[in-house]
Image (tube, rainbow, N blue to C red):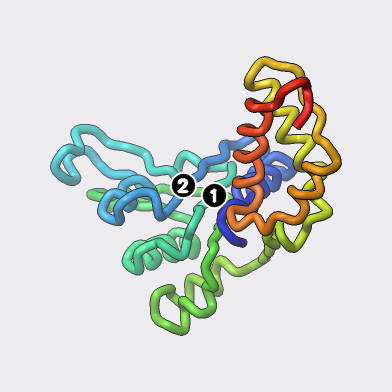
Amino acid sequence: GESGTGKELLARAIHELGPRSRGTFVAKNCAAIPGELLESELFGHAAGAFSGAQKAKRGLIELAADGTFFLDEVGDLPLSLQAKLLRVLEDKEIRRIGETRGNRVDFRLVCATNRDLKREVEEGRFRRDLYYRINVFTVTLPPLRERTSDVPELTRHFVARAAARLGRPQPEVSPEALRLLERCPWPGNVRELANVLEKATALARDGRI
C-alpha cells in the first residue's frame, strides 16, 4: 500500500486479534536507519563485536519472540541483510553479530512496502527467494481516494481524537466540509486526513468545522 494507508495499524490489529497477542509487537522501519546500524538493530550483537558495543544487546527480532515483528518498508532492506533475514526465517534461529552460536526464535513476521516487490525482484534489488518466503499471504491496502466511502467515519474518528487531545469539545463537521473532504485526492492518504482534521479541530470556531 501507499504511504499513509495504515499498514502498521493493520499489522497491530493482526497481532492483537491473533493467538500471539500476549507476546510483544515490535516494529521497525527499514528506511529510517542506515544499513550499517540496521543489522545490529535487527539481529543484536555480542559485547565487543564492534567499536562501541560495550555489552551484549538483543536484536528486535529476538524481542518479538512469541509475538509479532513488523518490518516496515521491507523493500529498503539492503541485499546483504535480506540474505540474513531469509536464513532466520528458514532456520528459526538468530545469530547476533560477533557470536558463533545461534538462538532459537519463534515469531510472526509481517512486512509492509509501498514498492512493487515483483518489479524490485526483476530489477535485482530484492532477493527472489526472500520474496517468495515472505509472500505467503498478501493484503493490499487501497489508497484513500479509492475508498472515499470511508471518509465520513474516519473524519468522525479523527475529529473526536483531536478534540480529546486538545481538551476541547468535539466540533461538528458541516456537510459542506465533509463534501470537500470526500472530493480531495489525499496523496498522503489516511495520515494526511488525520493531520488536516487535527488542524481543523484546533481552528474550529463556534463548535463547527
Where residue 189 appears, as percent x and y from the top left, is 64, 53
- Element under disc 2: strand
Front one among 168 and 203: 203
- Label 2: few (<14), some or many (≥20) within 10 Å? some
Q: Give the quadrant of the N terminus.
A: bottom right
In percent of width and height, residue 52 lies at 17, 37
Q: The residue under label 1 is which amino acid type?
A: Phe
Say whether residue 108 is left or right of residue 151: left
Residue 28 numbered tag: 2
Crowd rating for badge 1 (residues with CA inside 10 Å; few <14, some 14–19, many 20+): many
Mark 2 and mark 1 residues within 8 Å of each other at the beta carbon: yes
The residue to which callout 1 is attached is 70
Quadrant of the image occupied by residue 51: top left
**At 72% from the left edge and 45% from the top edge, which residue is drawn?**
18
Q: CA distance from mark 2 to mark 1?
A: 6 Å
**Image quadrant of residue 109?**
bottom right
**Residue 84 vertical placement versus 51 (above, below):** below
